[in-house]
Amino acid sequence: MENDGVSGGVVYVRSFDCEIRVIPVILDFIGEAADALGFGGSFAFDVKVAVDEACTNIIDYNCVVGCKIDISVESNGRDFIVAIKSRGEPFDPNAVKTPDISLPLDERQPGGLGIFFMKQLMDKIDYVSEDGLNTLTMVKQRPINT
């Protein structure tokens, strides 16, 4: 795991091949960064599920051959921030309609459930596409103990 120490904070950065076989390696990276930054247990599990869904979608639907997925992880103490960068056609997960989960399975439209889970598990999802570079930033906040 590479730590680039940007802006005096701790930022973990790593590049991965745009192939489905690397998903477990990506999730290990997220788990190691979460542990190093003091975000473990079910918190890290939720982040890993969201990152798994995001990276699987990128790999399955939007990878440009020979390109990498670049992932950075950082924290400001309360927020756990994951930025996923990849080259490909723009695709904003925030534009995907929320599936109607009240319908029986055989009446639901296919697709969108993974993005629904991402939105449920993370507190904020931002997406930017510039010059063929897509950046998906997901934030999960540490619960405040009351």
Image (tube, rainbow, N blue to C red):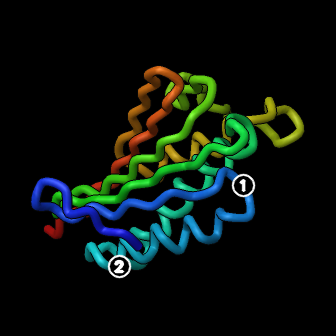
Relative vertical location of residue 84 with respect to residue 33 in this rendering, above or below: above
Q: Residue furthest front?
A: 66
Q: Which mark is residue 35?
A: 2
Q: Residue furthest left?
A: 8
The residue closer to the viewer here, 97 or 138, is 138
Relative vertical location of residue 143 with respect to residue 54 in this rendering, above or below: below
The residue closer to the viewer here, 22 or 114, is 22
* Disc 1 versus disc 2: nearer the observer: 1
Residue at position x 60%, y 70% in the image: 25
**Image quadrant occupied by the N terminus:** bottom left
Q: Name the element at disc 2.
A: helix
Q: Residue furthest right?
A: 106
Q: Earlier in the sequence, mark 1 or mark 2?
A: 1
Residue at position x 19%, y 56% in the image: 6
Q: For residue 32, what is the image quadrant?
A: bottom left
The residue closer to the viewer here, 56 or 69, is 69
Relative vertical location of residue 20 with respect to residue 65 in this rendering, above or below: below
Residue at position x 53%, y 55% in the image: 51
Mark 1 Cα-neighbour bin, 10 Å: few <14, some 14–19, many ≥20: some
Q: Position of residue 128 (x, y in %)?
A: 42, 27
Q: Which residue is mark 1?
A: 19
Q: Position of residue 97 (x, y in %)?
A: 61, 24
Which amino acid type corresponds to the residue marked 2 in the rendered image? Asp
Q: Badges 1 and 2: C-beta atoms under 8 Å apart?
A: no
Q: Position of residue 116 (x, y in %)?
A: 58, 41
